[in-house]
Image: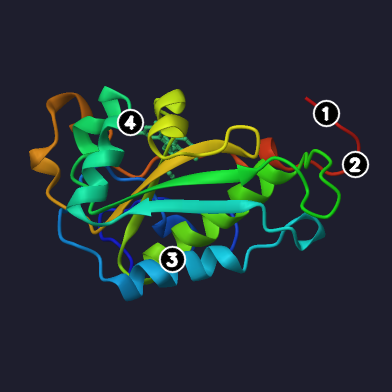
């Protein structure tokens, strides 16, 4: 499961899967079996959510016909590499609670939890999941018939096995490496807020 070129250093004990998850752009075109795709969304299904509303909805493409519909919904910079992905998905968040139709202020948060579950399960299966904010949102709603008043389109996700980084455009090759993080004391503080 772990990758030899991943030099990420944890600052405290942590399960290796957290370091092993990263967002490569060199994806292989090799198709992902339906059973694996189901496993990814199954992982997402078990994410926690406010009132257990499960406000996420993933819509995905894994056939050439659907992929050709999805690819033009990404910005050009993402198409440069994500056009290779054998699976493309969009993560949507239901705007209102089903229980009372009031705005769900945690819908995006919960959808983020579901995405992370999917991304970690992807690593367990030898796959990678790479989220993308760079999408043509208006077109996504229009082309995929998503009801705007009901759902917020959060991001796209490219899914696949690792491919050949030498095939990436020169501008992307240098960043094709697992990146670093802020230090632990910058992301968690005890007691009162402090800079
Ligand atoms: C919501 C979200 C949007 C992102 N949008 C893009 C994007 O449009 N294009 C891209 O190449 N990477 C995108 N990324 C990937 C981030 O750049 C990446 O997650 C971040 O640099 C941390 O690196 P890592 O995922 O490899 O650990 C996005 C990630 C997230 C979570």
Gap between marks 2 and 4 measured at Cα = 42 Å
- The reply to whether callout 1 and callout 2 are in contact (CB within 8 Å) is yes
Mark sitting earlier along the chain (3/4)? 3
Mark sitting earlier along the chain (1/3)? 3
Gap between marks 4 and 1 measured at Cα = 39 Å
Q: Is residue 188 visible?
A: yes
Q: Is residue 52 left or right of residue 111?
A: right
Gap between marks 3 and 2 measured at Cα = 37 Å
Residue for badge 4:
74
Mark sitting earlier along the chain (2/4)? 4
Residue for badge 1:
194
Q: Is residue 9 visible?
A: no
Residue for badge 3:
40
Q: Residues within 10 Å of mark 3 (few under 14, many from 20)?
A: many
Gap between marks 3 and 4 measured at Cα = 21 Å
- Observer-side mark, 1 or 3, equals 3
Q: Residues within 10 Å of mark 1 (few under 14, many from 20)?
A: few
Looking at the picture, does residue 168 appear above or below residue 66? above
């Amino acid at each position: 499961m772990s990758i030899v070129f991943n030099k990420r250093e944890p600052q405290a004990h942590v399960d290796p899967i957290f370091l092993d998850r990263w967002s490569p752009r060199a994806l292989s075109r090799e198709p992902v079996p339906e059973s694996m795709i189901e496993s990814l969304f199954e992982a997402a299904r078990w994410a926690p959510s406010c009132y257990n509303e499960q406000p996420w909805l993933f819509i995905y493409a894994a056939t050439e016909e659907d992929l050709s519909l999805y690819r033009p919904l990404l910005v050009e910079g993402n198409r440069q590499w994500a056009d290779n992905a054998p699976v493309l998905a969009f993560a949507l968040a239901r705007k209102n609670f089903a229980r009372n139709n009031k705005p769900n202020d945690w819908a995006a948060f919960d959808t983020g939890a579901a995405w992370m579950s999917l991304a970690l399960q992807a690593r367990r299966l030898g796959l990678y999941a790479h989220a993308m904010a760079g999408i043509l949102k208006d077109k996504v709603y229009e082309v995929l018939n998503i009801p705007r008043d009901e759902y917020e389109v959060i991001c796209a996700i490219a899914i696949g096995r690792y491919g050949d980084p030498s095939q990436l455009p020169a501008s992307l090759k240098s960043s094709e490496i697992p990146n670093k993080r802020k230090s632990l004391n910058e992301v968690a503080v005890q007691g009162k807020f402090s800079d």
